[in-house]
Image (cartoon, helix red, strand yellow):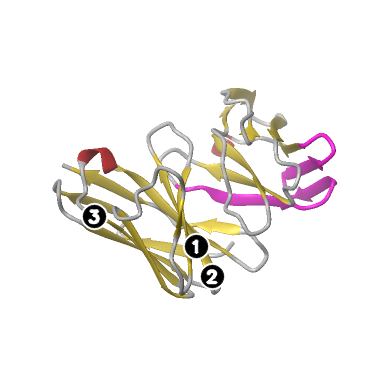
């Protein structure tokens, strides 16, 4: 399958600080990438759709000013959690869609806000 | 009605048996269907895709799709303990993101 990388894999930050997570599609160009969040023992929840060269589309209930998404190239999307709080602690996973509509997931980033 | 419904399980099968995982979906315009496997603490891994009615086989895995019944299934033959994971069914409408249900937890005992 296709390879999608995420960095960092784990991050611990203090409440009020911002954290940037990078998602890269390594072997195909992805005009569309997605960001999901998963709390323990819960379903994957779609946060936003990231479109190369345009603004992200956020799901209902996801604050666009808190979760900043930038998709500056066909292989890179970034998610910045601004002014993080303990309730933002979660497993953040990106995915990239190939021309065949298959979505491949990155390994995820485990965020802990203290 | 939920978009994707799966029995949360756990589904327990002995090693070597066939595991049968079922999924129903609500949106008739879904065109593509995917099965993902997610190990605890890890991200989902794509294991099968199916686009037309009928069966599709890949190694020990067989996906079955019936669009009229809005039903998709995954059979795992010769189940192994390493198959123990949560299996996520994901129908897709063109131009949209995958939406997941809670998945079915499979436990294969040795």
User: Could you say which disc has been placed on residue A82 in the image?
Assistant: 3
Q: Both on one chain, marks 2 and 3? A: yes
Classify A47 as above or below A95: above
Q: What residue do we see at 54% from left, 70% from top?
A: A31
Mark 2 and mark 1 residues within 8 Å of each other at the beta carbon: yes
Label 2 vs label 1: CA separation?
6 Å
Please identify, in this view, whether the residue under mark 2 or under mark 3 is nearer the observer: 3
Q: Which corner quadrant of the image does residue B1 belong to?
A: top right
Q: In this view, does A104 lie to the left or right of A42?
A: right
Q: Is residue A50 left or right of residue B3?
A: left
Label 3 vs label 1: CA separation?
20 Å
Classify A105 as above or below B10: below
Chain on which label 3 sits: A
Placement of the C terminus of chain A among the 4 image quadrants: top left
Q: What range of the chain is rendered magenta?
A: B43-70
For label 1, the residue is: A33
Q: What residue do we see at 59% from left, 52% from top?
A: B46
């Amino acid at each position: 399958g296709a390879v999608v990388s995420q960095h960092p894999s784990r991050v611990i930050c203090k409440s009020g600080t911002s954290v940037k997570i990078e998602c890269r599609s390594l072997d195909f160009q992805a005009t569309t990438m997605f960001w999901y969040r998963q709390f323990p023992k819960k379903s994957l929840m779609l946060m936003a759709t990231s479109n190369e060269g345009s603004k992200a589309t956020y799901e209902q209930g996801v604050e666009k000013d808190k979760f900043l998404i930038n998709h500056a190239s066909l292989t890179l999307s970034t998610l910045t959690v601004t002014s993080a709080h303990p309730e933002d602690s979660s497993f953040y996973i990106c995915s990239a869609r190939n021309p065949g509509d298959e979505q491949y997931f990155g390994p995820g980033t485990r965020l802990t806000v203290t | 009605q939920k978009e994707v419904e799966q029995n949360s399980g756990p589904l327990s099968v002995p090693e070597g048996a066939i595991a049968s995982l079922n999924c129903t979906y609500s949106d008739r315009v879904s065109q593509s269907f995917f099965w993902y496997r997610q190990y605890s603490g890890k991200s989902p891994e794509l294991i099968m895709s199916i686009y037309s009615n009928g069966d599709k086989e890949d190694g020990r895995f067989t996906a079955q799709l019936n669009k009229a019944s809005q039903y998709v299934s995954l059979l795992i033959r010769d189940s192994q303990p390493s198959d123990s994971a949560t299996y996520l069914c994901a129908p897709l409408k063109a131009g949209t993101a995958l939406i997941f249900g809670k998945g079915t937890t499979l436990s294969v005992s040795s």
